[in-house]
Amino acid sequence: MASDQRSSRLAAIGIVAMVLFGAMGMRMWFLQVVDAPALEQKVQSNKTRTQKLLPERGRIFDRYGRIMADNEKMLTVTVAWEALRDRADRLEIFGRLAPILQVTVTDLETRYAGPLGADGKPKGSKYSPLLPLPIKEDVGEDTAMYLLERSEDFPGIDVTNEWKRAYPFAPVASHIVGYLGAITQNDSAQYLDLGYNLNERVGQFGVEKVYERYLRGTPGYVKYEVDSRGVILKVVERVEPIAGNDLQLSVDLNLQQFAEQALETQLRLRRFVETCQAKDAKRKSVKPQFPDCQNLKAPAGSVVMMNYSTGEVMALASYPTFDNRWFNSGISGDKFSEIFPKTDDPDKSLLVNRAIQGQYNLGSSFKPFVAFAALDTGQLPGGEDYYYLDQGEYTLVSIDKETCQMIKCIYRNALCGGGNYACRYGKVNVEDALAVSSDTFFYKIGEEIFSERGGQPILQEEVRKFGFGSSTGIDLPFESAGRVPDKESKKKLVESGVLMEGESTKYLVGDNVQLSVGQGLLAASPLQLAQAYGALANGGDVNRPLIALALLEPGTPNSDQVGVADLTKAVVALNLGTKDTIRSLSLQPEVLDPIVRGLTRVITGPGVEYDFYHSTTGERLFASYPYKDLPIAGKTGTAQGAASLPWNDSSAFAAFSLDANQPWVVSAYLEKSGYGSKAAAPVVKCMFMATIGAATVADVLPSNPLDITATVAAPERSLPSNRCLGGAAYGGRD
């Protein structure tokens, strides 16, 4: 029996052994035959190291070749990871390097291990483990030579040549050009998929962001053979990087600088203006809980200048602004937070391009498009020959008297007679109503086009034809689409808590009345306003605004003039400046002509005679304007602010040239700066005068050295002469 048991055990062991030997054989066959290529690749990777070679970034020029973004050679000190693995060795090396590089050991340790998380532990370095660790960028040549000559004292030390972005004319056009920044954690996966290293800097704003993939170029690489310790034995392969495409913009840097100067100068001037509440006949404050008078805040604004025939943007200014050199300067995080504080106050937001991101009521500057809607849909009996008797106020007729006791049913014009009563303009047609900005004329349109057509969004559909409520498609990031209010949008605003509690989710006739004068829930940007006025100017083409003209082959040479590239020797790789008409409107003369005549009278007069002579909203301001040299037409607008207090009113103005050979359209919006005729209109006036040499336009000059100890993001800039702003003391209404 025992013998049988031993025999059984031996047989079992034999079977197990056979299975094991069989498995080993299969594994060896798999390794030798099936998995051999993968193993070979792994072995080879253990013997080689590949280092990416970053290309020179493409440069950015204005339309005349002035260099808005350039590159400078930058020396970066690196240390091999192998030399830092041992903590004691690492701290010893960092301790000796810190005073040489003028950084702290903590800074170097953060580079190695990453910043501390909420748990007090390092988050991990953002730098590639396959490349040497960069521990200090933009070091001086003397520092680099000192370290290289003492490489035996600093194991793994090296100095690499890289590129540093430069902005020769900063801070001019910083909102357009943008800046480079580190790849954020949220974007890391996207950029890794595109072949980036996480320590690369990428476009984060402006055209630097939009055209990142073209400007970056194509990286090269060096493949080294290394030993088991990572020591380089020889170069196996080297592929040179290909520089990025150069980019030519449509912007005229001189005009851009002038626009920024005009905007800043006017905002500063408006801050010294005291405005007071209107008084009734008994000389009592309309809102006694507020001070009678207060200075305008005038914190922010923007200017847009376009070619309305092509869509090319000549200038696009936003204030407050910043200096894009700050992002390449290596300032500390604390200093950066000081310059760019996180704030919920929109007045202090520097990194907002108000020309494309601002969401504003447009006030009376929106009226030409309401006039178009009325004429285009036949809402006005007799069209341009329709007359309305303006007695200063308008009472809704579609609301019964009982309901009117609970809601607002009476709407009034702006005040006349020292603020004692609403202006009365008498018998006015659409041309007159635009010239003197009769609110009641447009209130009537707003009510009737809504109530007589069953509450259908007729007005909304008509004004959307000009681009309101949709992104313009400009090649700049973060553009806001705006809003033309309707049933759906109002419901969303109420449900999201944007509108006050108790506000009806229904779109009511009063909402349409407010829309008819550019108030209420309307939201639009200065760029959208310029685009829409451009369509009036060119006969109905809604053109996409263009900020870039062309991508150029790398290596556009410099001219003999400092800071200017020779565009005559540039090679176009991709034309970006082709006119792109989003929509062509059929603007019949009987619709367009009375609108243009009304907008022309805003500039030239005459106004209307009723109880006395009422001038147009711009005729006094533009009395000194050289109209014969460049005839223009435009419209003022005042958007009422919080509590309808005058110091919260914002100012809008848009105008276009009547000369097709000088096809300019300009819009300006100055926040909390008062009447459109007094704040925004003078800036637009200056822009038109600049194009014909009637205002001093200084040549843009290279930047002054950047002061990294300063606490302001951009220095104050003023017009060489503010005479073009003259006339702002006249006029007064919207």
Image (spheres, rainbow, N blue to C red):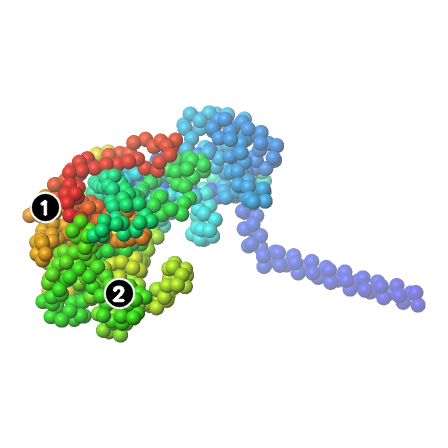
Residue closest to the far front: 282
Which of the 4 image quadrants contains residue 533?
A: bottom left
Residue 628, position as x, y percentages in the image: 6, 48
Q: Which residue is mark 1?
A: 623
Which of the 4 image quadrants contains residue 328?
A: top left
Mark 2 touches mark 1? (CB < 8 Å) = no
* Residue shown at 22% from the left, 43% from the top: 259
Residue 531 falls left or right of residue 113: left
Amino acid at pointer 2: Cys
Query: In this rendering, is residue 694 above or below 35?
Result: above
- Compare residues 17 and 167 and report the one nearer the observer: 167
Residue closest to the far right: 1
Q: Residues within 10 Å of mark 1 (few under 14, many from 20)?
A: some
Q: Which residue is mark 2?
A: 409
- Compare residues 440 and 499 and report the one nearer the observer: 440
Residue 722, numbered circle: none
